[in-house]
Amino acid sequence: MTLKKHRFLLILLTSAIIIIVGLVVYSNGYVSSGKQVTIGYIEVIEKRESIIIAINPMSNKKEKIELSVEDRNIWNLIEEERLYVVTYETKNGVSTLSNIRYPN
């Protein structure tokens, strides 16, 4: 086998490995899932069935944030007009509460 053929096969094999690894990584979800994680303060202004409506009291804009609460027990413990530190995930325009606690 000539040096040119050997080099060509090596490049071809390396390219194939890179493509296969890329496809495996992409198909296993290691690439960004399109969700945004937010951590911050909220003040709950309203509770609805499994949803809380809140504002960021630290912001000049008092935009309402609608958070879905999947755990009914947590939803029951959340109080209106109370300040919390939260983590929530937003994907496809839907924000879901991940963590909530009282500020220190």
Image (tube, helix red, strand yellow):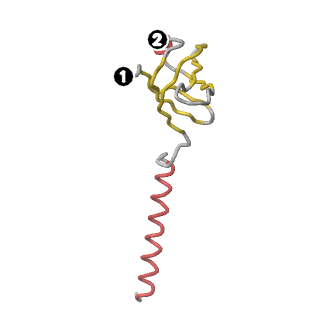
| Residue 62 rendering spot, x and y as whole percentages | 61, 26
Q: How far apart in space, not on screen, are marks 2 and 1 (Cα)?
A: 18 Å
Q: Which mark is residue 77?
A: 2
Give the camera-side residue of 23 and 68.
Answer: 68
Residue at coordinates 48% horizontally, 58% vertically from top-left? 22
Label 2 crowding class (10 Å Cα cut-off): few <14, some 14-19, many 20+?
few
Quadrant showing the N terminus = bottom left
Question: Residue 36 at what x, y percent from top left?
Answer: 53, 39
Identify the amino acid type marked 2.
Answer: Leu
Residue at coordinates 50% horizontally, 55% vertically from top-left? 23
The quadrant where residue 4 appears? bottom left
Q: In this view, does 73 lie to the left or right of 52?
A: left
Q: Quarter of the image containing the C terminus?
A: top left
Residue 90 figure quarter: top right
Q: Which of marks 2 and 1 is nearer the N terminus?
A: 2
- Mark 1 belongs to which amino acid? Asn
Q: Position of residue 81 (x, y in %)?
A: 53, 13
| Image label count | 2
Q: Mark 1 Cα within 10 Å, few/some/many (few <14, many 20+)?
A: few
**Vertically, is 24 above or below 102?**
below
Marks 2 and 1 in Cβ contact (< 8 Å): no
- Identify which residue, 73 or 79, lies in the foreground: 79
The tag on residue 67 is none
Residue 104 is labelled as 1
Q: Which residue sits at x=62%, y=36%? A: 92
Q: Is residue 20 above or below residue 104?
A: below
Q: Nearer the viewer, mark 2 or mark 1?
A: 1
